[in-house]
């Protein structure tokens, strides 16, 4: 069925017909103001009446979901977008706090963030719209895809290009996969925005990279406001993101960003001569220090020291003990709490270290995605970038890398292991 209060625009027909025909996986890389969220909302309204279940509309962050979707107004009608997609006559109840609507047909719909999806309770979703997927936490799809595969659910990815990141990878995969729908639409394809509007944006100061990204869906345009994006691109061009095996006679340094109820991120690095080799990356959330100690043991590296942020002496992983106290008990090698410096100083240190590094392409893939997207906050009203980083899922890997840049020391060669039993490394 299709609810009677909406009709797809002509250029949206291909996607709409794919979904209506039973398609399960779709990627729509459409330009700004092409109606991406509208088609996601109205398809969900239709799908929820075809099959009872839970449906999600996922934004990169839960905190932006309210403004972008739940409270968003359609400037053409003056009505809330969710009221247009989900009129009162099909609703059983609405929960403003949880941003959830229950329908009379037995389905429910909720706005969520890729940064908090795993904290939600209730039955798993059978349909998900991944809005602005190129800015979302990639781990969300990795976690949710087996759930949708098991329950026969669908996933719709709608976004504009944000450089050669996981959004570009997903689009390229979908293009070559006959079971997926893949479409990239620029303003020239849709005609939805006159070219004169682009000229006005140009005169108002919008950069060419931003125009290429937002209106022409270019994956090759530089990510606006990115701290490390150009450096990561250069490393890729120079083949410094490649297989980087662990060197058995060099010690490993780890650098941690510790999350209190949030993600904890760890980089693993070796200095081989004068070359920093970043051999591994790990992140998780909602687990204690004993979990991370187990992960370190399983990797079977020999550790030099572990770099903790300046507040490591304050937070607790185990009640009554500081992180440093627990780390000294559980982790091999030295535990070092770094001095407090400004974020700007740390970013500059990272910019100095990054071009010298070689990264293992597979083991560091998740961390590299975060470093590539780590960027300054953007003020939509003033149309300018601030001098502060945006705090989102990319921050954890980026903060840990700042700590690595502050504390990584010259070549550390493994010393002969003394013959003794009962050591931490076994």
Image (cartoon, rainbow, N blue to C red):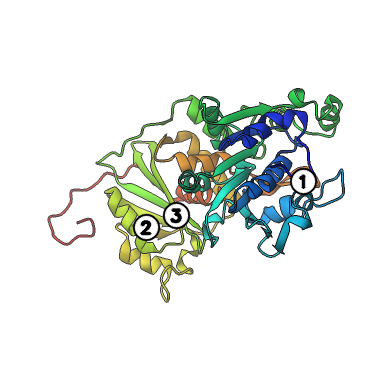
Q: Nearer the viewer, residue 180 or 131?
A: 180
**Residue located 69% across and 48% down the image:** 45
Residue 380 got which mark? 1
Considering the image in quadrants, where does the C terminus appear?
bottom left
Q: Is mark 1 on a helix, strand or loop?
A: loop
Are the two marked residues, 3 and 1, in contact with CB atoms closer than 8 angstroms? no
* Residue 269 vertical position relative to residue 342 in the rendered view, above or below: above
Front residue of this view, candidates 403 and 5: 5
Whether label 2 touches label 3, CB < 8 Å: yes
Q: Is residue 107 above or below residue 318?
A: above
Q: What percent of the width, then of the height, locates residue 188? A: 76, 23
User: Mark 3 or mark 1, which has the lower sequence index?
Assistant: 3
Is 163 left or right of 384, judged from the image as shown?
left
Q: Which mark is residue 104?
A: none
Asked whether the viewer can see residue 85, the reply is: yes
Q: Position of residue 213 (x, y in %)?
A: 69, 31
Mark 2 vs 1, N-terminal side: 2
Counting from the top left corner in percent of width and height, residue 298 is at 28, 51
* Residue corresponding to mark 2: 292
Establish if 15 lies above or below 75. Answer: above
Label 2 Cα crowd, 10 Å radius (few <14 / some 14-19 / many 20+): many
In the structure shown, which secondary structural element does the residue marked by tag 2 occupy?
Answer: helix
Q: Which of the 4 image quarters holds residue 39?
A: top right
The residue at which mark 3 appears reads as 284
Q: Which residue is drawn at 72% across and 32% down?
A: 12
């Amino acid at each position: 069925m299709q609810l009677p209060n909406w009709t797809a625009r002509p250029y949206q027909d291909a996607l709409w017909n794919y979904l209506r025909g039973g398609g399960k996986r779709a990627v729509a890389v459409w330009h700004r103001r092409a109606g991406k969220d509208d088609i996601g909302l109205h398809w969900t309204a239709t799908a929820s009446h075809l099959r009872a279940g839970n449906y999600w509309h996922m934004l990169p962050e839960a905190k932006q979901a309210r403004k972008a979707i739940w409270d968003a107004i359609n400037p053409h009608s003056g009505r809330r977008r969710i009221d247009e997609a989900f009129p009162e006559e099909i609703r059983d109840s609405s929960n403003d706090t949880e941003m959830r609507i229950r329908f009379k047909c037995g389905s429910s719909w909720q706005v969520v963030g890729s940064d908090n999806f795993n904290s939600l309770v209730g039955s798993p979703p059978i349909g998900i719209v991944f809005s602005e997927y190129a800015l979302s936490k990639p781990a969300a799809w990795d976690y949710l895809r087996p759930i949708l595969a098991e329950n026969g659910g669908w996933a719709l990815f709608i976004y504009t290009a944000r450089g050669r990141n996981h959004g570009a990878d997903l689009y390229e995969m979908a293009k070559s996969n006959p079971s997926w729908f893949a479409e990239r639409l620029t303003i020239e394809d849709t005609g939805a925005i006159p070219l004169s509007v682009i000229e006005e944006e140009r005169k108002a100061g919008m950069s060419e990279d931003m125009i290429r990204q937002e209106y022409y869906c270019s994956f090759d345009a530089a990510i606006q406001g990115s701290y490390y994006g150009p450096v990561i691109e250069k490393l890729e061009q120079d083949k410094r993101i490649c297989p980087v095996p662990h060197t058995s006679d060099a010690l490993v340094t780890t650098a941690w960003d510790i999350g209190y109820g949030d993600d904890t991120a760890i980089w693993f690095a070796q200095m081989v001569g004068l070359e920093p080799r970043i051999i591994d990356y790990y992140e998780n959330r909602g687990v204690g220090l004993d979990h991370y100690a187990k992960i370190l043991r399983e990797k079977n590296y020999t550790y030099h020291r572990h770099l903790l942020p300046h507040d490591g002496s304050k937070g607790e992983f185990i009640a009554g003990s500081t992180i440093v106290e627990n780390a000294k008990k559980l982790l091999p090698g030295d535990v070092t709490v770094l001095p407090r410096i400004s974020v700007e100083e740390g970013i500059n240190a990272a910019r100095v270290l990054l071009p010298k590094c070689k990264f293992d392409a597979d083991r560091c893939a998740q961390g590299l995605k975060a470093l590539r997207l780590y960027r300054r906050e953007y003020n939509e009203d003033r149309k300018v970038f601030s001098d502060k980083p945006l705090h989102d899922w990319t921050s954890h890997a980026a903060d840990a890398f700042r700590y690595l840049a502050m504390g990584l020391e010259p070549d550390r060669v493994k010393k002969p292991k003394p013959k003794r039993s009962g050591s931490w490394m076994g």
